[in-house]
Amino acid sequence: MTGTSAEHCIRQPVLFLPHGGGPCFFMDWPGWGKLEAHLRSIATTLPRKPDAILVVSGHWETEIPAVTSGKLPELIYDYYGFPEHTYDLRYPVPGSPRIASRVRALLTAAGIPNVGDDVRGLDHGVFIPFMLAFPDAEIPVVELSLGAGMSPTKELAVGHALRPLRAENILIVATGMTFHNLPQFLSNDRSTDAASRAFDAWLVSTIEAAPDLRDEALRHWDKAPGARICHPREEHLLPLMIAAGAAGTDRGQQSWHDIIMGKALSGFRFG
């Protein structure tokens, strides 16, 4: 098979990208260089340029899943206390009402209630990493929210419903952090360093397991070593559940790893 038909058969992978701490890549905050380099390399690892990107971030929660449908989403500077210039960052990426409608149709077909939102912009869990990964701001971006309830099972089901997008040349990206205990992360207290390493090791072995075992383990992530130390609240981990659901039968792999301020952090790729 050649030409357009062959290209249509190439599925995009599913990515889980650590988005860093606030606007960390655009200020004098040492320690984030390896993650910056990883994010800048993302586009070169894809089978082809996506027609659109569907992203879910740990920074948007709604009662039921919501999908941005505006044509020109604004940026939401939802970080606080950072240098003034970080509130002047720009990422003039287009949205896509058409892709938003497709996402909503897939969710509806799976029996998952959802809404469109033509007003909401893109939070920093999207535009900060995307300024590095897709700096030209040419690929339309649609954002999906996390649903209320913090349910791994529900988020896995959301991801499962969205799997067809991958064969439609739509890249599914989840952004969050595999360690997100901010008081511990920002302090000089190293008492949770070991817990971060234990949880990270569990997460890597889980993501790299057979898909059925992976998904079952993720449903009970809070029983993993160090889980609640790393995630007192799980909103920054749940995007990974959507990524795993969208992966389907594709096995995952650790795509990036580093120790930052004593805490183990990882990124993942499926397919």
Image: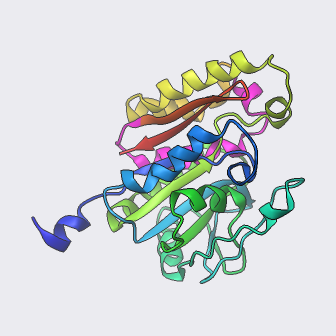
Q: Quadrant of residue 145?
A: bottom right
Is residue 111 visible in the rendered image? The answer is no
Indicate whether residue 235 is drawn in magenta.
yes
Residue at 40%, 72% (x, y): give it.
Answer: 51
Indicate whether residue 229 is drawn in magenta.
yes
State which quarter of the image contains the N terminus.
bottom left
- Whether residue 24 is situated above or below residue 89 in the rendered picture: above
- Whether residue 236 is situated above or below residue 202 in the rendered picture: below
Residue at 81%, 37% (x, y): give it.
Answer: 182
In front here: 254 or 235? Answer: 254
Q: Position of residue 23 (x, y in %)?
A: 73, 53
Q: Position of residue 208 (x, y in %)?
A: 42, 30
Is residue 226 visible in the rendered image? The answer is yes
Is residue 242 toward the left or the right of residue 52 in the image? right
Residue at 70%, 72% (x, y): give it.
Answer: 121
Direction right: furthest residue: 81
> Which residues make up the magenta segment?
226-252
